[in-house]
Image (cartoon, rainbow, N blue to C red):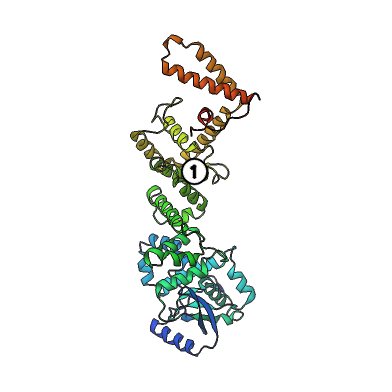
Amino acid sequence: MADGATTAPEIPAAAPPPREERFRMIGELAAAARATHVAPLRGRYEAAPVVELPEALLLYRVENGRLIAEIEEHARRQGLDLAELRARQETLEVQRLLHRFLVEKAAAAEGPILQELAEQGQQVEPLLISADGVLINGNRRMAAMRALLARDPVRYAGFSAVSAAVLPADVTPAEIEAAEAALQMAPETKLAYGWINRRLKLRRQRQDMGLSDTEIQRAYRLADPGRIEVELGELALAEDYLERYLRAPGAYSLIADAEPLFTGLYGQLRRMPPSLAELWTLAGMAMICGRAAIQGPFDRQFPFADPIPGQLPLLAIRRLAEEQGLAAQADAGDSLALDKAAREQLALILCDPARAEHLAGELHALMERIRAELQDLSSPARALQLLQKLRDTLARVDPERLTPTQRRQMQSEVAAIQAKSAVLFGEASAPRPGRLSRLFGGKDR
């Protein structure tokens, strides 16, 4: 190392004191405290004593909602289970790991706590801690204050002791989870939880901590209780993509920027019949994986937004199967549904990540062609072309070969064409929707 070179100090500098010692010291300070600070607890706001204590007494929390995805991904890379990190929360190694993640969050441009504290040079709002010194609200602020203190111990000497509101000793883990959610996950939070972190936290609170849907809805300030199932469904789809499609379970950083794609895709899949949703799940995953091959924003197009036209999902899957040689070209009037064998073969093609970039571009271009073709079908030139073709076809029909049923059907269709023509040429007003509307894109009612 060159003369004069320095190494950035590791933060925290030392492991926190044992839990029993922290519990005793904080309890004594809380008992003597005169100031209070309200905190959300047990479905209401309660006054918590505010104490001044050395920053070295406080611990970052592994269950911090902003870090769930990052911590899980780190644990997987290290061959660890998240439960192991929880069990080792009080070790210096884990506290330093959490600090590194939190300092990065504190410096984020969308919620620059580090910059604000550097300029202010003082703490303006108490942290919220458990009775044994674990940070519940204020993990980023604590990380920023510790980083600044290490950077300039003179200028930021005030950060060596911090202000914190202390929750009661009998608070349960589930109540801590609810308090953190109420403080941090509400819509007005300065730096919002990442979309994956929010859903991981919600799932843990519901499945592991036993919070009721009413408690979750209140903490997250959800106007619609159905949003809980929707957000958990979006998370399940994202994890299915990582595990089944990419073979990279828990690699949440790969989809950190893909929230509109997963939320949009999940919303569309819920509206499809199962056989079609199964294929569009894979097709959507292929498009997400290969999204770099698609020029321009496509999150406002199907399968991430409503299909235009409405029959696009079925038409596109059928056309893709035809182009892959899995189904014969459908004629007018034929069913567009694929048989089981074709669906299974198409699924094998769609679930191959190595083909995702090609498939993404192909699907996007295919749907653009379908939209253009359907638009062309409604143009006057196309209508004239079809009428000329119909005239030639009718000229070749032998009247003697018509059955009574066919004769009636053809008479009905010709009458429908005449009625529509009268409207088109201004000779009659448009009929009310009914039997004739099926010829022009509607359905019998």
Going by the picture, which residue comes out furthest to the bottom?
A: 32
Identify which residue, 30 or 309, lies in the foreground. 309
Q: Decide if residue 10 is in sight here.
A: no
Residue 390 position in % (x across, y down)? 53, 17
Going by the picture, which residue comes out furthest to the left?
A: 341
- Name which residue lies at 60% across and 81% down: 154
- Name which residue lies at 44% across and 73% down: 176
Q: Is residue 428 left or right of residue 302?
A: right
Going by the picture, which residue comes out furthest to the right?
A: 426
Residue 282 position in % (x across, y down)? 41, 43
Identify which residue, 228 or 132, lies in the foreground. 228
Counting other residues with Cα less than 10 Å from the Cα at mark 1, is it few (<14), some (14-19), or many (20 or more)? many
Task: Name the element at disc 1.
Answer: loop
Q: Decide if residue 221 is in sight here.
A: yes
Task: Tell me: residue 136, above or below residue 70.
Answer: below
Amino acid type assigned to the residue bearing label 1 in the image: Pro
Residue pointed to by mark 1:
303
Residue 214 position in % (x across, y down)? 44, 65
- Name which residue lies at 41% across and 50% down: 241
- Name which residue lies at 40% across and 26% down: 328
Task: Tell me: residue 380, above or below residue 350.
Answer: above
Residue 375 position in % (x across, y down)? 57, 31
